[in-house]
Image (cartoon, rainbow, N blue to C red):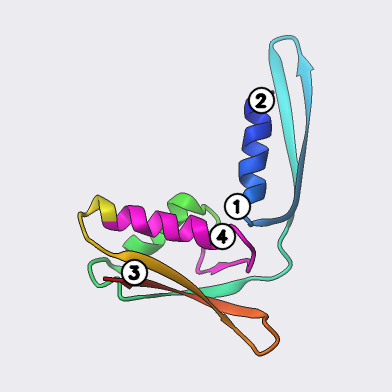
Amino acid sequence: MESITQAAERLGQSGLFKSLGFRYVTKGDVISVTFEFEEADSIVPVTFDNFVWFTDDEVRAAVRDAVPTFDGVVPPTDGVPDLISGALQALLKGRGIPGRIQFSPQADLKGNVLGYVCIDDC
C-alpha cells in the first residue's frame, strides 16, 4: 500500500494533472488499483534552444523518458519544468557535455504562461 501512495504522490507532484486520486480493492494476494485523474486545463508549447550536440528527436526522446505524454506541449503547472530540466540535464551529463539547463516561462502581461523556452546554457 505504501508504494501505491508513493506512486500517487509522484504523479501528483509532476504537475501533469489538475487532480489525482486512487482507490484500491484487495482480493486474497491480489490488489487492484484504479487511478482517477483530471488533466490540466491548458497546455503550452516548449521550445528547445542551443542543444547543438543533439538532434531534435534525441532531445524529445530524453524528455519523453521523464514525461511520457510529452508531444511538444505541456501544462503550465509546477513540477513540469523540473521534470523536463532534469531529463535534459541527464542527457548532457550522459554525454559528458558541460552545461546547465535553464527553463524559462514566456508570459503575457497578466502573468499567464504562453510557453516555455528550455536553453542549454554552456
Query: Can residue 8 be found in the magenta stretch?
Result: no
Q: Quadrant of residue 61?
A: bottom left
Q: Which residue is drawn at 64% across and 64% down?
A: 77
Q: Residue at x 20, y 54 (%)?
A: 96
Tell me whether the residue at label 1 lies in contact with that at label 2, contact meaning CB atoms closer than 8 angstroms: no
Q: Name the residue under label 3.
A: 56
Residue stretch in magenta:
71-92
Q: What residue type is labelled 2?
A: Glu
Q: Name the residue under label 4.
A: 80
Q: Is mark 3 on a helix, strand or loop?
A: helix
**Whole-percent x, y for residue 120 in the image:** 33, 70
Q: Residue at x 63, y 50 (%)?
A: 13
Measured Cα–Cα span from mark 4 to mark 2: 24 Å
Q: Mark 2 points at which residue?
A: 2
Measured Cα–Cα span from mark 3 to mark 1: 23 Å
Tell me whether the residue at label 3 lies in contact with that at label 4, contact meaning CB atoms closer than 8 angstroms: no
Measured Cα–Cα span from mark 1 to mark 2: 19 Å
Q: Which amino acid does label 4 sit on?
A: Val
**Whole-percent x, y for residue 107 in the image:** 60, 83
Q: Earlier in the sequence, mark 3 or mark 4?
A: 3
Q: Name the residue under label 1.
A: 14
Tell me whether the residue at label 3 lies in contact with that at label 1, contact meaning CB atoms closer than 8 angstroms: no
